[in-house]
Amino acid sequence: MTEPAPSRTSAATSPARLTVLSGPTAVGKGTIMAEMRRRHPDLWISVSATTRPPRPGEVDGVHYHFISPERFDELVAGGKMLEWAVVHGRNRYGTPREPVERQLAAGRPVFLELDLQGARQVRQVMPEARFVFLAPPSWAELVHRLVGRGTEGPEERERRLATARQELAAVEEFDHVVVNDDVARATDEVLSLMGFDPQ
Protein backbone atom coordinates (compact mmCIF):
# COMPACT_ATOMS: atom_id res chain seq x y z
CA MET A 1 0.00 0.00 0.00
CA THR A 2 3.00 2.29 -0.31
CA GLU A 3 4.52 4.17 -3.21
CA PRO A 4 8.14 4.57 -4.31
CA ALA A 5 9.65 7.57 -2.59
CA PRO A 6 10.21 10.52 -4.94
CA SER A 7 13.26 12.70 -4.51
CA ARG A 8 13.28 16.03 -2.70
CA THR A 9 13.41 17.71 -6.10
CA SER A 10 10.17 16.12 -7.25
CA ALA A 11 8.44 17.27 -4.04
CA ALA A 12 9.49 20.82 -4.77
CA THR A 13 8.27 20.79 -8.37
CA SER A 14 5.04 18.78 -8.03
CA PRO A 15 1.76 20.49 -7.06
CA ALA A 16 1.34 21.19 -3.35
CA ARG A 17 -0.62 18.42 -1.69
CA LEU A 18 -2.26 17.98 1.66
CA THR A 19 -1.24 14.90 3.65
CA VAL A 20 -3.47 13.76 6.52
CA LEU A 21 -2.07 11.41 9.19
CA SER A 22 -4.59 9.65 11.40
CA GLY A 23 -4.71 6.66 13.70
CA PRO A 24 -5.90 5.52 17.13
CA THR A 25 -5.08 7.16 20.42
CA ALA A 26 -1.54 6.51 21.78
CA VAL A 27 -0.30 5.13 18.45
CA GLY A 28 2.38 7.81 18.32
CA LYS A 29 1.05 10.42 15.88
CA GLY A 30 2.52 13.29 17.90
CA THR A 31 5.87 11.53 18.19
CA ILE A 32 6.05 10.97 14.43
CA MET A 33 5.08 14.59 13.81
CA ALA A 34 7.80 15.84 16.18
CA GLU A 35 10.41 13.69 14.44
CA MET A 36 9.30 14.99 11.03
CA ARG A 37 9.63 18.55 12.28
CA ARG A 38 13.09 17.82 13.72
CA ARG A 39 14.37 16.44 10.41
CA HIS A 40 12.67 19.04 8.22
CA PRO A 41 12.23 22.30 10.17
CA ASP A 42 10.87 23.91 6.99
CA LEU A 43 8.00 21.40 6.76
CA TRP A 44 4.72 23.21 7.43
CA ILE A 45 2.59 21.32 9.95
CA SER A 46 -0.84 22.65 10.82
CA VAL A 47 -1.47 23.35 14.50
CA SER A 48 -4.93 22.28 15.64
CA ALA A 49 -7.19 24.23 17.96
CA THR A 50 -8.68 22.49 21.00
CA THR A 51 -10.92 23.24 23.94
CA ARG A 52 -9.06 20.89 26.27
CA PRO A 53 -6.54 22.30 28.77
CA PRO A 54 -2.81 21.91 28.06
CA ARG A 55 -0.98 18.87 29.36
CA PRO A 56 2.31 19.39 31.22
CA GLY A 57 4.95 20.63 28.81
CA GLU A 58 2.55 21.61 26.02
CA VAL A 59 2.97 25.10 24.56
CA ASP A 60 0.12 27.17 23.15
CA GLY A 61 0.58 27.73 19.43
CA VAL A 62 3.15 24.95 19.16
CA HIS A 63 1.36 21.77 20.22
CA TYR A 64 -2.17 23.20 19.95
CA HIS A 65 -4.01 26.49 19.96
CA PHE A 66 -5.75 26.21 23.33
CA ILE A 67 -8.98 28.20 23.07
CA SER A 68 -12.23 28.56 24.99
CA PRO A 69 -15.39 26.68 23.98
CA GLU A 70 -16.95 30.05 23.15
CA ARG A 71 -14.14 30.99 20.74
CA PHE A 72 -14.33 27.54 19.16
CA ASP A 73 -18.07 28.06 18.56
CA GLU A 74 -17.32 31.37 16.83
CA LEU A 75 -14.80 29.78 14.45
CA VAL A 76 -17.19 26.95 13.54
CA ALA A 77 -20.11 29.32 13.01
CA GLY A 78 -17.95 31.50 10.77
CA GLY A 79 -16.91 28.59 8.56
CA LYS A 80 -13.30 29.03 9.65
CA MET A 81 -12.65 25.39 10.53
CA LEU A 82 -11.55 22.94 7.83
CA GLU A 83 -12.72 20.17 10.12
CA TRP A 84 -13.66 19.73 13.74
CA ALA A 85 -14.85 16.99 16.03
CA VAL A 86 -15.75 16.09 19.58
CA VAL A 87 -13.06 13.62 20.68
CA HIS A 88 -13.64 10.94 23.35
CA GLY A 89 -17.04 12.48 24.04
CA ARG A 90 -15.61 15.56 25.71
CA ASN A 91 -13.27 18.10 24.16
CA ARG A 92 -13.39 19.59 20.67
CA TYR A 93 -10.50 19.72 18.23
CA GLY A 94 -10.38 21.47 14.87
CA THR A 95 -8.15 22.68 12.05
CA PRO A 96 -8.25 26.39 11.22
CA ARG A 97 -9.00 26.61 7.50
CA GLU A 98 -7.21 29.79 6.44
CA PRO A 99 -3.59 28.82 7.26
CA VAL A 100 -3.96 25.51 5.39
CA GLU A 101 -5.41 27.11 2.28
CA ARG A 102 -2.75 29.85 2.35
CA GLN A 103 0.12 27.35 2.46
CA LEU A 104 -1.32 25.19 -0.33
CA ALA A 105 -1.87 28.26 -2.50
CA ALA A 106 1.79 29.19 -1.95
CA GLY A 107 2.85 25.77 -3.24
CA ARG A 108 3.98 24.27 0.07
CA PRO A 109 3.06 20.70 1.09
CA VAL A 110 0.81 20.70 4.16
CA PHE A 111 0.68 18.06 6.91
CA LEU A 112 -2.28 17.49 9.22
CA GLU A 113 -2.45 15.13 12.20
CA LEU A 114 -6.13 14.32 12.77
CA ASP A 115 -8.44 11.89 14.47
CA LEU A 116 -10.70 9.68 12.33
CA GLN A 117 -13.67 12.07 12.40
CA GLY A 118 -11.49 14.94 11.22
CA ALA A 119 -9.90 12.89 8.46
CA ARG A 120 -13.32 11.95 7.15
CA GLN A 121 -14.40 15.59 7.06
CA VAL A 122 -11.28 16.62 5.16
CA ARG A 123 -11.85 13.83 2.63
CA GLN A 124 -15.29 15.32 1.92
CA VAL A 125 -13.92 18.80 1.15
CA MET A 126 -10.43 17.90 -0.16
CA PRO A 127 -10.67 14.40 -1.68
CA GLU A 128 -7.40 14.96 -3.56
CA ALA A 129 -5.48 14.87 -0.27
CA ARG A 130 -3.27 11.90 0.69
CA PHE A 131 -4.64 9.96 3.69
CA VAL A 132 -2.20 7.93 5.82
CA PHE A 133 -3.23 5.64 8.70
CA LEU A 134 -0.67 5.15 11.49
CA ALA A 135 -1.25 1.70 12.98
CA PRO A 136 0.19 0.04 16.10
CA PRO A 137 2.16 -3.21 15.76
CA SER A 138 -0.58 -4.91 17.82
CA TRP A 139 -3.55 -4.16 20.06
CA ALA A 140 -1.54 -5.21 23.12
CA GLU A 141 1.19 -2.71 22.25
CA LEU A 142 -1.36 0.07 21.84
CA VAL A 143 -2.80 -0.63 25.30
CA HIS A 144 0.75 -0.73 26.71
CA ARG A 145 1.57 2.68 25.22
CA LEU A 146 -1.62 4.26 26.50
CA VAL A 147 -1.13 2.96 30.04
CA GLY A 148 2.59 3.74 29.95
CA ARG A 149 2.22 7.43 29.18
CA GLY A 150 0.22 7.89 32.40
CA THR A 151 -1.76 10.93 31.28
CA GLU A 152 -5.24 9.45 31.74
CA GLY A 153 -7.06 7.79 34.61
CA PRO A 154 -8.73 4.35 34.30
CA GLU A 155 -12.09 5.74 33.14
CA GLU A 156 -10.51 7.96 30.49
CA ARG A 157 -8.27 5.09 29.30
CA GLU A 158 -11.30 2.87 28.76
CA ARG A 159 -13.05 5.64 26.83
CA ARG A 160 -10.00 6.11 24.62
CA LEU A 161 -9.58 2.39 24.02
CA ALA A 162 -13.22 2.09 22.97
CA THR A 163 -12.62 4.88 20.46
CA ALA A 164 -9.41 3.20 19.28
CA ARG A 165 -11.29 0.00 18.42
CA GLN A 166 -13.59 2.00 16.14
CA GLU A 167 -10.65 3.84 14.57
CA LEU A 168 -8.75 0.62 13.82
CA ALA A 169 -11.81 -0.75 12.05
CA ALA A 170 -11.65 2.19 9.58
CA VAL A 171 -8.17 1.41 8.25
CA GLU A 172 -9.48 0.50 4.79
CA GLU A 173 -10.65 4.09 4.28
CA PHE A 174 -7.05 5.28 3.98
CA ASP A 175 -4.69 5.43 1.00
CA HIS A 176 -1.65 4.14 2.90
CA VAL A 177 -0.99 2.29 6.17
CA VAL A 178 2.23 2.89 8.13
CA VAL A 179 2.92 0.62 11.11
CA ASN A 180 4.59 2.48 13.98
CA ASP A 181 6.81 -0.36 15.16
CA ASP A 182 9.84 1.96 15.19
CA VAL A 183 9.63 5.76 15.25
CA ALA A 184 12.58 6.37 12.91
CA ARG A 185 11.41 3.82 10.35
CA ALA A 186 7.78 4.96 10.44
CA THR A 187 8.88 8.58 10.04
CA ASP A 188 10.99 7.58 7.04
CA GLU A 189 7.91 6.04 5.43
CA VAL A 190 5.62 9.03 6.04
CA LEU A 191 8.21 11.49 4.74
CA SER A 192 8.79 9.34 1.66
CA LEU A 193 5.06 9.29 0.92
CA MET A 194 5.13 13.09 1.00
CA GLY A 195 8.09 13.21 -1.38
CA PHE A 196 10.66 14.33 1.18
CA ASP A 197 14.12 12.88 1.72
CA PRO A 198 13.76 10.94 5.02
CA GLN A 199 17.35 11.95 5.97
Image: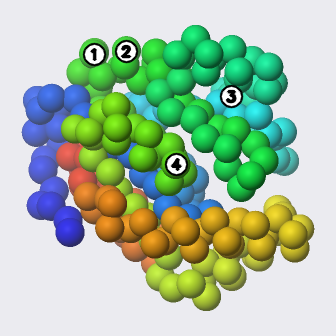
Does label 1 or label 3 sit earlier along the sequence? 3
| Rendering coords of residue 65 (x, y %) | 68, 28
Disc 1, disc 2: CB below 8 Å? yes
How many discs appear? 4
Of residues 194 and 17, the one nearer the viewer is 17
* Figure colour scheme: rainbow
**Mark 3 = which residue?**
65
Does label 2 or label 3 sit earlier along the sequence? 3
Observer-side mark, 4 or 3, equals 4
Report the amino acid beneath label 4. Gln
| Label 1: element kind | helix
| Rendering coords of residue 121 (x, y %) | 44, 40
Q: Is residue 102 left or right of residue 67?
A: left
Residue 38 badge: none
35 is higher (above) or lower (below) than 93: below
Report the amino acid beneath label 1. Ala
Disc 4, disc 2: CB below 8 Å? no
Does label 4 or label 3 sit earlier along the sequence? 3
Does label 1 or label 4 sit earlier along the sequence? 1
**Mark 1 = which residue?**
105
Report the amino acid beneath label 3. His
Residue 117 badge: 4
Write the residue at 81% across / 24% down: 68
**Mark 2 = which residue?**
102
